[in-house]
Amino acid sequence: MIIAATLEAYSMNKTEKIVDIKNLKVEFEIKQSFIEEIFYKKRKIVKAVDGVNLEIYHGEIVSLVGESGSGKTTLGKAILNLVPKHEGDILFKGKSINFNNKKEVKKFRQKAQMIFQDPYQSLDPRNLIIDATAEPLEVNNLINNSAERKKKVIKALEDSGLAPGENFLYRYPYELSGGQRQRVAIAGAIILNPDFIVADEPVSMLDASIRTGILKLLLDQKKINSLSILFITHDLSLAWLISNRIAIMYLGKIVEIGESDEIIKKSCHPYTKALLDIMPIPEVHRNRKRKVLSGEIPNSSDIPKGCRFHTRCEYAFDPCRLEEPELKKIKKGHFVACHLFREGAENE
Amino acid sequence: MALLRVNNLKTYFQISAGIVKAVDDVSFVLNNGESMGLVGESGCGKTTTALSINKLLPQEGKIVSGEIFLEERNILKLNDSEIKKIRWNDISMIFQGAMNALNPVMKIGDQIAEAIILHKKVSYKEAIEKSEELFKLVELEPKRISNYPHEFSGGMKQRAMIAMALACDPKLIIADEPTTALDVMVQAQILNLLDKLRKEVNMGLILISHNLSILGETCDKIAVMYAGKIVELGNVEDIYDNNMHPYTNQLLSSFPNIHKEKKIPEPIDGIPPDLINPPSGCRFHPRCLYAENICKEKEPEMIKINENHDYCCHFGGIFNE
């Protein structure tokens, strides 16, 4: 299947926003020892997500890419109300969700589901596949009798590529391979016919040959049920392959966002370029010279002042140390947060 | 000169369900200073091959037949105390999930020194000095040898493990999925480091990975394993640009390549076979797009295309037609 065609189709009806995130912040407090609490007035706070704006359109896949510790998973969880508390506004189909209203949250969560990274941990080992898959139905009181329950589970399993579904109902997770388990997890996510799915590294634990099957499944689901997906990954080439747009995240903020081809071929932010430079490409590269950023991502309890990337950036100049750059539009649909790029400027 | 020669290695596991033929007739040669990638899906026998070379197999595992020559010596004929001398001194191993391989209640420097003292006749002080040198080599601050593992990040622990593997100046390092649990940037750092060290110290390297896309820049040659057998072996150029086996071809196309057309590759149907009862004939035939009757009946033999490039398939290169 050639994605360019779907991309075109998508841009034509790029009208309805499924999810609209406004200035989302998630903070965690680090537990300190008793003595520290007495002597240091200042609380230690980790700013995992530090002011993110993101729109996801109807039938679109947006990839969220970054190193571990960049806050990708926390952002995904925060959208689905899976973190203790967050600041900022989340609009679902144009309506702001009041996260204090349990009924409203429950209704929203029927339409917004999550697929987790590790299918070896996300399924309860003592639950039969039928129980694991049917749980969302039960939580939401959506079934009346066991025949209906069974029917719905079989359909979800078969839609997820586990056919015939009857053969899987009364098995335990340990009887399935990693790829099959991930399909069960997907069945559990699509059984409520959601409009939006957060998929957190859904293929990173799987073998390469199994991986493409799962990706195909997600793309099929997107097409058939016009799902919108937030695809969290650290693999930029994978993001390019399956998504319409890519957002690059660093230390709790989006530093660059744009159409996936644009990000891969005409990226601007030095961090995106660094990620591209180290992206493994299945080709012969004897003596490939690549720039590898030294060190690791700074601790998010101690975010550098100014541009948060300046400590690892080779182009950093004075303004970067003083002032935090805003996410600026440099081209239609392409936004960058870097002092090196002015508003409306093409690649310099 | 050949540093390591593996001839017709067969390693089987005896479990209650039967005999698992984890490694079944594997042969390859690694020359001095060369690096080889060993690639394949989970359960294809990559790690078992590595453990056989080190004679570190668990109780159930037995090397049934074959020869492993390290330079002139046949490792399989050595007794336990002789093998102990070879480990670390000649062959060292970086284990999968190295982050968990460090002892959490012992200082990292002491753990490295322990390995050195066991294999070289040196004092504790000299061993610690050597550890500091090794830390410099793997680009860690030497003063951090007195840290405990929990004070290190994942990437730093992996560097410490590499330092430990280098402790006795081995001729061959076997790295089993050295970057799997690490982040992309750290993965690139570790691969660069391994490549740099290998060239500086001129040692052989066997890099085991399921990720074919990272091997193109660190390896001279690649062996593709499937269900306990090597199905294709060749220089990186042979494997990436001129591969002959359908499995190599499909595995390679499973990795997205931004220089090529943007399309989702065809998945390889089915799952890797059960190695207690492997499929008859060619072991890949149940999942192969080009399988014919002969593939079911007759096991293909290794075919040599050039000096370095072998494959085993009845219809090699059929996907190019």
Image: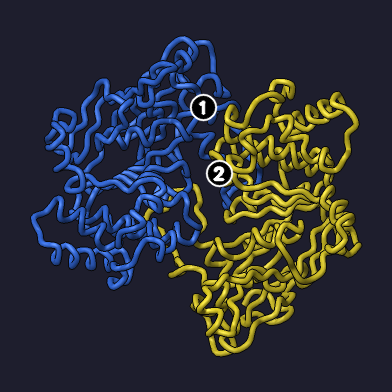
Chain colours: A yellow, B blue
Rendered image: mark on residue A6: none
| Amino acid of disc 2 | Met
- Note whether residue A310 is visible: yes
Residue A163 spot, x, y in % from top left: 72, 24
Q: Nearer the viewer, residue A96 or A102?
A: A102
**Image quadrant in which you'd find residue A189:** top right
- Mark 1, Cα crowd under 10 Å, few <14 / some 14-19 / many 20+, is some
As drawn, is B127 to the left or to the right of A30? left
Residue at x 17%, y 33% (from the top left corner): B75
- Mark 2, Cα crowd under 10 Å, few <14 / some 14-19 / many 20+, is some
Q: Nearer the viewer, residue A149 or A340?
A: A149
Residue carrying label 2: A205
| Amino acid of disc 1 | Pro
Under tag 2, what secondary structure? loop
Residue A279 spot, x, y in % from top left: 52, 57
Residue at x 24%, y 27% (from the top left corner): B7
Indicate which label's residue lies in the foreground, 2 or 1: 2
As drawn, is A316 to the left or to the right of A110? left
Under tag 1, what secondary structure? loop
Rendered image: mark on residue B272: 1
- Note whether residue A7 is visible: no
Is A103 situated above or below B90? below
Q: Name the quarter where the N terminus of chain A is drawn.
A: top right
| Residues flagged by tags 2 and 1 on a common chain | no
Q: Nearer the viewer, residue A195 or A246?
A: A195
**Image quadrant in which you'd find residue B28:** top left
Is A215 situated above or below A296? above
Residue at x 78%, y 53% (from the top left corner): A60
Residue B219 spot, x, y in % from top left: 36, 47
